[in-house]
Amino acid sequence: EVQLVESGGGLVQPGGSLRLSCEASGFTFSSFEMNWVRQAPGKGLEWVSYISRSSSSRYYADSVKGRFTISRDNAQNSLYLEMNSLRTEDTAIYYCARGTSDIWGQGTVVTVSS
Amino acid sequence: DVVMTQSPLSLPVTLGQPASISCRSSQSLVHSDGFTYLSWFHQRPGQSPRRLIYRVSNRDSGVPDRFSGSGSGTDFTLKISRVEAEDVGVYYCMQGTHWPPETFGQGTKVEIK
């Protein structure tokens, strides 16, 4: 079964850091580009970041540029999102999505609050 | 960034009746490769989004044929031929032509009357 499973979310204070993980199974992870997409409480979907198959290209939304870092480990079938200098407006469910967003994980909740 | 505008934002529907959602982009979504990267997603309450349609009119595997996508350039439509109870939730359009960033519409909430 093709599956993406996120983890690493939690409650963090403003200015803090978190590292999200997304573990892939059921497909050849290294053959697909990957994205992170987030959804603030009661709001719509917002693309956050993209990484190419070899990690040679990485892109970020302006709202997270300079604070978030996307990475992947193809040997471990895993995608990561390192989040630093977190703000209250980063509070959201964070989803990893495969390629053209044909497969999504169940999401991991990040809450930034004092 | 390309702005995606959906209408209506709320759509009460009767079971068994058709439903239609519009999505307009602030610029043409025709890519230089000739494809138009416009997708539709459905998100049920408490669940992650699921892609229904890609490249305007192609249904994903397992998507019922009561769902159809159409349009070109800047105007696109998702149609449900006969609404079923499991179709409730929020529908989003998304463009992947002019990225980064990929951009989503605001979402259309479909509920049963």
Image: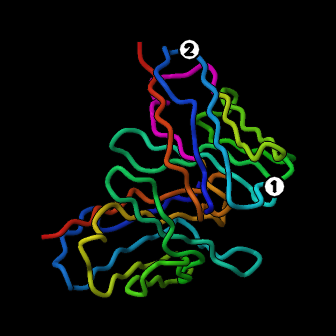
The secondary structure type at the circle numbered 2 is loop
- Disc 1 crowd, CA 10 A, few/some/many (<14, 14-19, 20+): some
Query: On the image, which quarter does residue B17 sit in?
Result: bottom left
Residue at the spot of label 2: A15
Location of residue B55 (image quadrant): bottom right
Task: Tell me where the magenta segment starts and ends, as one range.
Answer: A83-95
Decide if residue B88 is on the left or right side of residue A111: left
Q: Nearer the viewer, mark 2 or mark 1?
A: 1
**Amino acid carrying mark 1 in the image:** Ser
Return the disc, 2 or 1, that comes first in the chain's sequence. 2
The residue lying at 34 percent from left, 82 percent from top is: B80
In the depicted structure, whether residue B86 falls above or below residue A35:
below
Q: Position of residue B111 (x, y in %)?
A: 21, 65
Q: CA gap, disc 2 to disc 1? A: 33 Å
Q: Is residue A96 left or right of residue B106?
A: right
Which residue shows up at 62% across the image and 61% down it? A2
Q: Seen in the image, is B29 located left or right of residue B7?
A: right
